[in-house]
Image: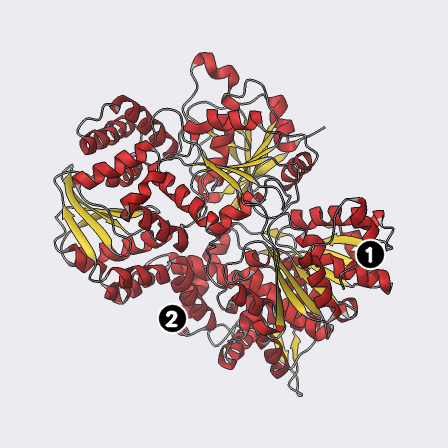
Amino acid sequence: MGTLPEPFAGWFAARGWTPRPHQLALWKAARAGESALLIAPTGGGKTLAGFLPSLLELHEAPREGLHTLYVSPLKALAVDIARNLMDPVSEMGLPIRIETRTGDTPQNRRARQRETPPHILLTTPESLAVLLANPEAPELFAGLRSVVVDEAHAMAGTKRGDQLSLCMARLDVLAPGLRRVGLSATVAHPEALRAWLSPTARAEDVRLVVGRGGAEPDMSLMLPEGHLPWGGHMGIASAPGVLARIREAGVTIVFVNTRAQAELIFAALWKINDENLPIALHHGSLEISQRRKVEAAMAAGKLRAVVATASLDLGIDWGAVDQMIHVGAPKGVSRLLQRIGRANHRMDEPSKAVLVPANRFEVIECVAATEAVRAHELDGDPPRPGGLDVLAQHILAMACQAPFHPDDLYAEVSRAGAYSTLSRRDFDDVLRFVEDGGYALRAYERFRRLFTDSEGLVHVRDLRVARQARMNLGTIVDTPMIKVRLRGGPVLGEVEEWFASTLEPGNSFIFAGQTLRYEGIDALTMVVSRGGEGDPRVPAYAGARLPLSTNLSFRVRSILAEPRRWRALPDPVRDWLRLQQRRSEMPQRDGMLIEVFPKGGRWFMVAYCFEGRLAHQTLGMLVTKRMERLGFAPMGYLGTDYVLATWSAFEPTDPERLFEEDILGEELEEWIAESSMLRRTFRNIATIAGLIEKNHPGQEKSGRQMTMNSDLIYDVLRKHEPDHILLRATRAEAAHGLTDVSRIATLLARVQGAVRVRRLDRVSPLAVPALIEEGREWVAGGAEDALLAEAAALVEQATDGAEHFADVLAEVTEGVRVRSGVVDRPRRQDRKRRPPPRRFIRSAKGLAS
């Protein structure tokens, strides 16, 4: 098994390569008919390892029909893999046809693929679900021998992963003996991922193959010139340093964490890009054709840099990328490693990464992430059980393919890794819902989609139901979006409906790398023109903030609690922490520090929790509810990644009571029942489950219409069938995911008996970043100047008049303007340099020839 046959051996030799051990290990597993999970570093030839057994089988025993299915989380990745795979196939002269099937595939090609399938088909979970919902699926997949799941860690535990898990269980029925291959570079829980991938839901039935580690990454920290901000900011002050690094390298990917930050960093780079270096923008809200052109130009070496979000996290193979620059804290070790792997896609050479923190807390987080990478630690939660809404969609899709018996389908679903713990009661309740909507909805004809014949077989009710079901397959439920179109020109991308509703004609905003003027709404499309007056805003997107991982949270707390480790921090941060020691004390690794102090006629309480923004936001709701019961008159709260801050009319006495474990009882239930979160969660679940249609022939529903429909159904179910399966799924998802209750529970359990309370007469140095962040709530018209003065005064108060107060004031001023969605207009002499030239805007984001 150590020697490849010709022409494969010759093809490797012609490139000076030898097959890597993990590539040969996957070939050996395939020969034994075993499924396998390959964990190997980026640049280690994972993709070739996944396909090599299939290419060898098709070479040794040529045949017609579909042999291998490759499933990718990204359409772009499937297209890129197809392009890269075709090169060795053509160079070795193999008579193997490779095609892609995604939502962008033309209808005529889809029809041809059904009639004459390729040997290897590259697709996405959504397109696979559509293929399996057709009556021709048994014939199409009967000869399938292999399923390759790329970036398996990115799908397991998500709703797309639930859908894929169910689809693979059906493929096992259509093609017995099918083997599965999972590919991943970063896996924190390999045993759980093996179980998710397994055809039996047992980890031991999937062989684990671990590739040899590559060269250690070359990581460095870059601070902004001048004063290091205390808090807030988007990293814009570091734009000159980032541009200098771009200038020195061949090709650079500049990663950021949010789409709004991508727009701001791109604009800041162009403002100082006197050499007109070709720099492009890439994020998920830009028009897909523009993203594809940026990707093609990047692959062709036509760009010096691209500013990107998570839209480029996953594996497009760009070997020419010289370095990765990360502006802002990474929020997770696995995420950082994934992004580092985009640079220098060669395993035997170090990837170069530059971390650019925007403020002092982010410096500590970047140092913690660097230490974790060097210690080979990973983070991330193990895959959660599959969602009942995804199961409902799958049941209807399987009825569209062919009638089934409930016992057979339950046995099949239970072999899916994501649903191995599914109870028969939950399965039957979901089936009943799909059949007629359940007790409260069965009187409505529109919810009757299945029927059972005299032999117990379940059928789809009619062709109309089947057609509608196929149109609405998929688990991606976006926040209501609206397209942005240039008047008389192309669509640039899309923004969220709520942002559009805040604009008035004439308002300007930054999007797609340029300043646009809002003109109005036309047929569910936002019409804009170039230019615009006034300070431009930046669209923000719900859920765009990445949560701080548990691993990084622990490391940040450890660094703060151990002064000997401060040697790894730059001087301004060490000085800041020493000042905190003098004014108050440091948070401990396994405890919690709470500071209480008066300011501006209110009482502030700052709790150093370090459990991430999402957990702190939920905890803030619960804490302020308890504060209200105790008579402290809470006025507001704010959760950052590092702290929870509240402000109230009266001094919170015995604040330890606010963090007792029973806060997750009555307060949590009361808040969940009263909040709008359950309605939003129900809408998403009802959409995936098929209760609410996203797509209908000849109709396009706005997000507002869908919300109204879901609210009506939600109220009916709560009143008449409170135990409805979709309400159970909604409550479970709200408690498990959206509120981050598990992290709150861990925090509260950890700090019991270890809460330290410090009563101060003024703000502490460590609390300044939170109060600067809190100040953004006050930005409204003329209040901005007062806010800037207030924010600067915080720093002066905490430092008793630091000698660099003027520098601090300038940095705070810039940070407040950015956070409030305002970007300073350039001075008159600078305006010719910002925004970037229209000629290159077109080429940078659209790359039109």
Q: Which numbered dot is residue 112?
A: 1
User: Residue 427, relative to residue 767: is it above or below?
Assistant: below
Q: In which quarter of the image is the N terminus?
A: bottom right
> Circle 2 is placed at which residue position?
719
Write down the quadrant of residue 285 in the picture: top right
Q: In which quarter of the image is the C terminus?
A: top right
User: Residue 804, relative to residue 208: is it above or below?
Assistant: above
Q: What element carries label 2?
A: helix
Given the image, on which type of amino acid does mark 1 rest?
Arg
Mark 1 or mark 2, whichever is nearer to me:
1
Count up the numbered dots.
2
The front one of 795 and 467 is 795
Q: Image check: 396 left or right of 619?
A: right
Residue at x 68%, y 58% (from the top left corner): 21
The front one of 590 and 285 is 590
Residue 639, horizontal then vertical, whole percent: 31, 48
Given the image, on which type of amino acid does mark 2 rest?
Lys
